[in-house]
Image: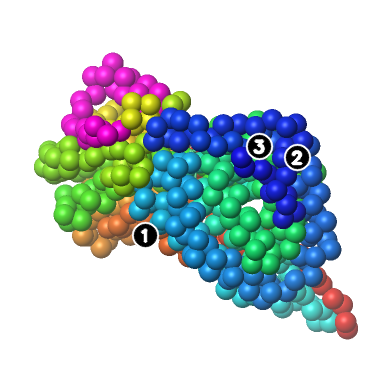
């Protein structure tokens, strides 16, 4: 049984209620988490405030950095254990689960070194004045985390917040808590003071909502769906609490006729099947210049047919989806495709060893998907790639920008001028040219425009969001 982790202590929910933890590979319950409530959030927020006021705010940036570095090393040492927890909890194939644990260690390493290099400015002003700016922590930051990359999102969000001098109250997804509770305990082991990292588990509408409303929470970092992002903004607006929103995407991969298709094909496939397509930055739309549309679909179709799906510990190309409702969501999209006569090019295969009770979905390549269809407009959050042709640069830009989202775009072309023109014209938080994701570097600021959210996490840029700027003007004559 998993407990909340508040003030470096494992505690049950004040209500005594729990929720089951289900393994997506076989649909079986294997553990329990606490079903928290507003009272539990209140305990965590007060512990965090106490710690911020009396302890953490006295730490220098260098001291915070040293602790983060120790935590990075501890996470790296425990990477196998953390990966195993997240694999069972979220259905991640072994390679992905290990990569996520190591990315968590790398986030802490990056932010360990960043905090003491982050500072304000002096501003030339009137004669007789000196003006300077201070970058001050908000105080207690709230972090609401989704289930698709718990460790990575905890790393980028909590890592940046701690480096900037905040203390954290974290609400993991009800579907993905185990690795994060363990990381909070590791933080205590390496010397983080009581109250710096607090974890309260439970449902979003109970614990998440209480966190967003709590008067001791000075900033909210939310990563999740646009729908819940709207609710968070509304709640936060009532008390003017600043918010960072990392929301969804419907990201295009745009392939011009002069692209290197040998490089395009594996990258396009990985960008839609990684984590079973449950990735905010999944390359879920494929826009292809008409001269090479048939050739590329033919080659991609053959590759899709060879993709294999199965239990997380078989470490195949694709693992299960997170839960039954997510599987149903993907089925609904695919049945809408059938009704609209959208042609299927190819599908991968679910292996015979996959238990019937697991939440599997074969990767699916669809073609000629109209831009107005919901498959082109909404996040499927499953391994479904939607292809459509385009004529020229203008049409590619128009189609790429024709959704409510603006998270990531990939452009494949050897033409240097076009690379820059496309990067400028795409409405997107990130543009990748002749690659997609650049290996996910923790140094690279990440976030969206339009319904993909606002604010940036990752990299040095995140530290701006996790601090408030104070201007100090001194008249000394
Ligand atoms: P979700 O919005 O359902 O849940 C996210 C978190 O919010 C969970 O912890 C959930 O419990 C909590 N929550 C739910 N209702 C709430 C409420 N009323 N008040 C407060 N908190 C509440 O999203 P999900 O299904 O867990 O994750 C998938 C979504 O996350 C996708 O849309 C995906 O694109 C997005 N995402 C975005 C990024 C990014 O960096 N932009 C990264 C990962 C995932």
Q: Provide the residue span drawn in magenta.
A: 326-354
Query: In terms of image quarters, where does ligand 1 lie?
Result: top right
Is 68 inside the magenta-drawn segment? no
- Residue corresponding to mark 2: 40
Checking the image for residue 34, the label placed there is 3
Residue 237 appears in view: no
Residue 342 appears in view: yes
Image quarter in which the N terminus is found: top right
Q: Residue at x 71, y 58 (%)?
A: 196
Q: What's the distance in space between the residues labelled 1 and 2, CA to CA?
A: 38 Å
Left or right: 79, with 114 as reference point: left
Left or right: 240, with 158 as reference point: right
Is 328 inside the magenta-drawn segment? yes
Q: Residue at x 61, y 31 (%)?
A: 19
Q: Position of residue 321 (x, y in %)?
A: 40, 35
Q: What's the distance in space between the residues labelled 2 and 3, CA to CA?
A: 10 Å
For label 1, the SS is helix
Label total for image: 3
- Residue corresponding to mark 1: 439
Q: Are marks 2 and 3 in contact (CB under 8 Å)?
A: yes
Vertical arrangement, residue 204 with respect to residue 462, above or below: above
Vertical arrangement, residue 11 with respect to residue 135, above or below: above
In-front residue for pair 402/464 = 464
Q: Earlier in the sequence, mark 2 or mark 3?
A: 3
Q: Nearer the viewer, mark 1 or mark 3?
A: 3
């Amino acid at each position: 049984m998993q407990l909340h982790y508040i003030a470096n202590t494992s505690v049950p929910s004040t209500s005594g209620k729990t929720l089951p933890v289900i393994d997506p590979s076989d649909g079986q319950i294997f553990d329990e988490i606490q079903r928290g409530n507003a009272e539990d959030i209140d305990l965590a927020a007060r512990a965090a405030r106490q710690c911020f006021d009396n302890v953490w705010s006295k730490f220098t940036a260098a001291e915070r950095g040293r602790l983060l570095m120790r935590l990075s090393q501890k996470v790296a040492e425990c990477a196998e254990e953390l990966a195993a927890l997240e694999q069972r909890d979220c259905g991640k194939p072994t390679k992905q689960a290990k990569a996520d644990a190591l990315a968590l260690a790398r986030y802490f390493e990056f932010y360990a070194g960043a905090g003491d290099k982050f500072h304000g400015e002096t501003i030339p002003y009137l004669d007789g004045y000196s003006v300077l700016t201070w970058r001050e922590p908000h105080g207690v930051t709230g972090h609401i985390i989704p289930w698709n990359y718990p460790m990575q999102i905890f790393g980028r969000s909590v890592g940046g917040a701690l480096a900037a001098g905040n203390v954290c109250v974290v609400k993991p997804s009800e579907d993905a808590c185990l690795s994060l509770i363990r990381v909070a305990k590791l933080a205590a082991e390496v010397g983080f003071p009581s109250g710096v990292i607090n974890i309260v588990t439970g449902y979003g509408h109970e614990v998440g909502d209480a966190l967003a409303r709590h008067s001791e929470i000075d900033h909210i970092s939310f990563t999740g769906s646009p729908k819940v992002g709207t609710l968070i903004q509304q709640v936060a607006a009532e008390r003017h609490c600043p918010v960072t929103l990392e929301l969804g995407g419907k990201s295009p991969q745009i392939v011009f006729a002069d692209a290197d298709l040998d490089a395009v094909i594996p990258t396009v496939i990985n960008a839609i099947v990684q984590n079973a397509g449950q990735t905010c930055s999944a390359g879920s739309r494929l826009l292809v210049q008409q001269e090479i549309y048939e050739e590329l679909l033919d080659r991609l179709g053959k590759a899709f047919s060879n993709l294999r799906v199965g239990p997380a510990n078989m470490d195949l190309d694709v693992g299960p989806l997170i839960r039954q409702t997510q599987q149903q969501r993907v089925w609904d999209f695919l049945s809408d495709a059938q009704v609209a006569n959208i042609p299927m090019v190819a599908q991968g295969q679910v292996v015979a060893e996959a238990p019937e009770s697991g939440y599997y979905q074969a990767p699916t390549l669809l073609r000629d998907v109209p831009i107005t269809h919901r498959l082109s407009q909404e996040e499927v959050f499953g391994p479904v790639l939607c292809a459509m042709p385009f004529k020229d640069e203008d049409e590619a830009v128009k189609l790429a920008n024709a959704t409510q989202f603006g998270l990531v775009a990939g452009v494949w072309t050897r033409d240097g001028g076009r690379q820059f023109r496309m990067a400028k014209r795409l409405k997107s938080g990130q543009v990748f040219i002749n690659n997609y994701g650049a290996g996910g570097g923790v140094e690279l600021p990440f976030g969206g425009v339009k319904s993909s959210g606002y604010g940036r996490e990752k990299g040095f840029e995140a530290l701006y969001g996790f601090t408030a700027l104070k201007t100090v003007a001194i008249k000394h004559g």
